[in-house]
Image: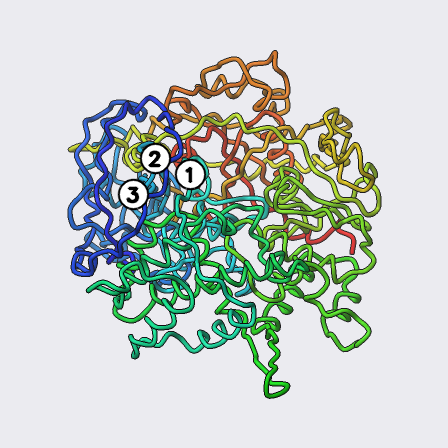
Amino acid sequence: MHSEVGSWEYAKRQRQRDANRGPALPPAPIAPLPYAFPDEAAVTADLAQLQLNRLPKTRTSPVVTRTKVARHGSQPHVVRPSSSGAENGIMPFRQYAPPRRAGSYSHPTPLEEFRSSRKWPPSGYRSDHELDPREAEELIRTGASAFRGYCDAIPNAPQGYDRFYAVMTSEHQTRTDRASFNQPAYRDMSLNMTGNPESQFPWLSLEQPSMAYAYGKSAGTTTLNFWISKSASSVPPMKLAGDIKPKKLKFLQILDRLQRLENGLEIDDPEEMYRYLYSTLIEDPERYSDHPHYGIAQQIEDLIDVLSNPSWIDFSNPKNQVVAKFFDSPDQHRKQEFFHQLLLSVELYLRIHSKGYTDKAKRKLLLQLPPAITWDLAVAQRWMENMEITKSRTSNVQSTFSFELKSKKRQIEALRVFAVMLKWPNMDEIDYVLEEKDRREKPLEDRSADAMSWFSGIVLPGRTLPWLIMNSLIDCDRDTGEALKYLTHMHTSSGFQYRANTYWSAQCIVGKVLGAARGVKQIAGWIGPCIYTPDLKRTECVRIKQHESLDPKLFPVDVESMDERTDPLGPEEASYPAADYEVPMPDTEDVTDLIRINRLSFVPAKDQTSSARQSSGVPMVFDSAIYFACGGDSWPMKLTYDVDFINAFPCHQGPHVLFYDFEYQAVKIDDGLVDLHDWGRQSGRTSRPSSSRSSPSKKSLTLTSSDKPAHMQVSKVLTIEALGVSDNEVFARAWCSHHGHSAIIANIKETCMACAIREAYAACISVVIFTEGGKETEKDEGVFV
């Protein structure tokens, strides 16, 4: 178990609300002030290890009605297990202990015999045999994926505001459901402000859900943790109530102090720390009393009070997260205000991270802060990591300041890899510009605010990074013209066509579906190169009309009961009848090769934004669809709903058996799927009148419920066998978007059918798509560069 997680306090939170009722969210609170630094003695107390003991359950009751068990965090002396895909900071893979031999080395154990024959029950057992717990543990649970959910109350928020997480047990470096970061620069989309910066446990991230878990291993997919986290409550808007203002400073004074702080605070000289802070930056409210604020904890409180003034820039607001719009603004007043706020934030950041305070103490303080101030600290951290100020004296009375981009080489290399992975059509131009050998060319960072943010490395965590890197790439290619300048993180359901390819945001449903196509890659939040469409101009930016998914919303009871509901053994018993289990297997012999993508269709939506109607060049909103050809027939699939595709977590030494209560219905991609229109009702969802926000037709019925737990709306899972060519999986994903079903994407080379079905029940999703990831012979066929 990772030591960082082992030292993290995770206290039990008693919930008094009805498990079958969604919480009513109270109005936004006023942030309490001032904020006291946590008591060191209490904060640094050691915690013992989490006990992952199984609790007794009663036999043969259906999965959806099993008695609720206590989560791990409710036990005393607990440690939260490592999370899905934590590639750094987790234990290396250790082989399972070799199975015991029965009597002689010439005879395999029942487990070995079952693995090789895939027949259940294994040799030596009859169908009416009852396994004891030791036998069941070895034959059923060994190597199977296990899922646990956690529900945390948001600190300083009213009751009902929670964060959700999902973690996997038996995890190691080669067993993960999420994509790795191709370049160190891409890690900046997530930020852990305490402890080892390489640690990427989802609950340690400043941004929520954690962007370290946003992208699955397969293009167009996400992870179980990100899916679960998306269903949690958003942070309530905090109304900062501070009215204390700092002392006025000249711009050169601010820059001079920022340069000095690059070498750290004067920790060894408390008198000088006190003198500068209270004589130059802020007021000491007790300066003339018997208790002036020489202590760091008191100074932290005073800096928080000043930064709590609502007149400062709120970097927790996504529209303010392209930081270069402030520090490189042509408006001198706006620029000076940013640097004044930055200076106060750096002073606060260095005091919080000064020696003498443990990571636990820092984290406890950060959890108490309003989001706006926590994001101020993120700006300060990114600035100190990536920017350096140089002071040059031009005369006895004059000095000039310049900025050095410390991470520029790293950012250039990351941009080049990004372009190569996406098979950018004009790669020669990109290579020429990135070399910066032509003095007539504008410097890379001066081409736009997005380019300045990217090449300086001042990138805040969250959803901005994919848009900064793509806009920087476009800025480096003069052939793109003005048509692609409208891409922004404020409109994530976007993409564009450039020459013979299309490229899509990983948050756009077109990208999620086409991510399964041959030759398509996913990198830094973008998917491409995808197929060309004649419905768009040769170079055109578009926004896609996509409706909210019809999947039921998760409640805390759905998350906290995850491990119990999806246990491979079913309810815990004194014995386990072998007849209660089966070995589901997809048909790998009879696989169709007839389905092909015919064309990608875009039709202007009836409802256009006012800017699109009034201004030329502003992206229009389109309805999207994919037409498939199969045996002479044309199958149109509208990409109507913004569903998600979750990359299945790999199991070990499958196949595994499936408990009878995990009901499923198998269908092949070319055998009835196109005619299946009411799976939501068949799978157990209840219906209610739709809203115009969640459905394209106000007269239709959406299959979701606002007062019923999500796990009680999934009584059966549809397993779609989309093996063979990549277009089969594209069709299955398009079908899901057409009908409003999110799905588990299970590659049979990495996981078995039983584990994928149980993961669907864990996520409260009613569809699983089985795939092989396409055929090796396909490669990049059909992709133009």
Label 2 or label 3, whichever lies nearer to me, is 2
Q: Which kind of residue does numbered mark 3 sit on?
A: Arg
Instruction: Report crowding for label 3: few under 14, some 14 to 19, many 20 or more residues within 10 A (C-alpha).
Output: some
Reply above or below: 495 against 523.
Answer: above
Per the image, the residue denoted by label 2 is 559
Tell me which label, 2 or 3, sits earlier in the chain: 3
Secondary structure at numbered mark 3: helix
The x, y position of residue 726, in whole percent, is 64, 43
The x, y position of residue 80, in whole percent, is 27, 50
Per the image, the residue denoted by label 1 is 228
Q: CA distance from mark 2 to mark 3?
A: 21 Å
Q: Which kind of residue does numbered mark 1 sit on?
A: Ile
The x, y position of residue 466, in whole percent, is 60, 53
Secondary structure at numbered mark 2: helix
Q: Which kind of residue does numbered mark 2 sit on?
A: Val
Q: Is residue 94 at least partly visible in the picture?
A: no
Which quarter of the rendering shows the N terminus? bottom left
Reply above or below: 178 against 714.
Answer: below
Per the image, the residue denoted by label 3 is 141
Q: Find out whether the residues at labels 1 and 2 contact each other: C-beta distance under 8 Å.
A: yes
Reply above or below: 463 against 247.
Answer: above
